Amino acid sequence: MPAENNPSDLPSEVLLTFCKAAADSLRLNILRLLKNDSFGVLELCRILDTAQSGMSHHLKILSSAELLETRKEGTSIFYRRAILSTRGPLADFKKSFFHSIDRVQLDSDILIRKTQVYADRGRQSQDFFSRNADKLQENQDLIAAYSNYSDCLENLIDNEQIPAANRVMEIGPGGSPLLAKLSSSFQSILAVDNSSLMLEQTRCFARSHNLHNITYLESSIDELPTETRTDLIVMNMVLHHLPSPAASLETAGQLLNANGRLLLIDLCPHHQDWARATCGDLWLGFEPQDLDNWTANAKLRRGQSAFLGLRNGFQLQLRLFNKA
């Protein structure tokens, strides 16, 4: 047995630090909240109805026990549950601990306040689109113009040999040329957007390119009825605008038919905070491991992937996930 897994080598202070972190109901609620999401300190204070000074104290204890990790999003710090190592002191214990606390439901008032935080994030994103719909595509091209990754993306779609009769849903297509590729490859496209102005941009793009096999629906992905099932969901540079990426990916998994696919194009983590003001980004990219974990929770298994570095310093990830 490796030395790091030998119970006799476990320092007592490591065990005590963990036990201290776990021995508080508020800290357990923090960990439950962060199962598949990340929140800033003020958001956690609001959801758990706790003063900021007290919340910071609890977060410090959980971080000392290596149960939390932080991620800087521009000038903000977001907390997330730590990705556990498969080796080392307490590895199996922590895994069992997370599994156990996840079986306990959060109180209804906590869930209500969490939903309110999501709604505020969503309104922030939707307000941006309403104010900037006319120049959003131009601003988006500053980060990742479709021409920079179109060849790789279209090869990825073609190489999957997805039947043309399959139904395809694109979330937030805007005026991206990807819509023309999907329209030429599949018989039926459903364009979904929660902004009427952005959906009108999609209609204008379709008319100007003579695309006639597209249906339009004003809705967020999280509000789509479960009967709106499809064979392929495409989310092209959309996930970083969504209030809860993990929850939206779980919804995507539920909307896919058997053997369905999710095609996800988004940014890897970056620190260019101007993207928030210019493009309305809520999140500054995603760790590939986070996407793997969130899609696994949505019962999707990892398929083909490609990672593209861009000259402006951003890195794109093109990820395909299959319904498990």
Image (cartoon, helix red, strand yellow):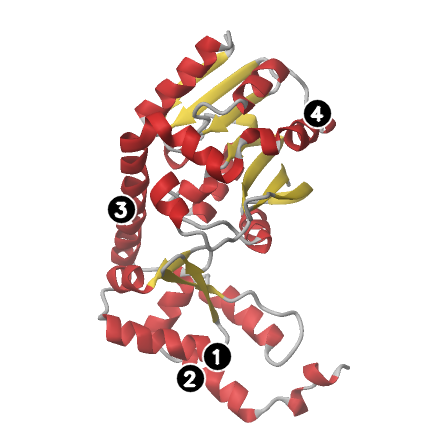
> Which mark identifies residue 158?
4
Quadrant of residue 55 within the rendered picture: bottom left
Amino acid type indicated by mark 3: Asp
Amino acid type indicated by mark 4: Asp
Can the viewer see residue 120? yes
> Which mark identifies residue 120?
3
Q: CA distance from mark 2 to mark 1?
A: 8 Å
Residue labelled with disc 1: 65
Circles 2 and 1: CB atoms closer than 8 Å = yes
Give percent across and percent down for residue 1: 77, 82
| Residue at the (26%, 54%) spot, across then down | 113
Indicate which disc, 4 or 2, sits on the residue closer to the N terminus.
2
Q: Is residue 310 left or right of residue 51?
A: right
Q: Quadrant of the C terminus?
A: top right
| Residue at the (28%, 30%) spot, across then down | 130
Residue labelled with disc 2: 20
Circles 1 and 4: CB atoms closer than 8 Å = no
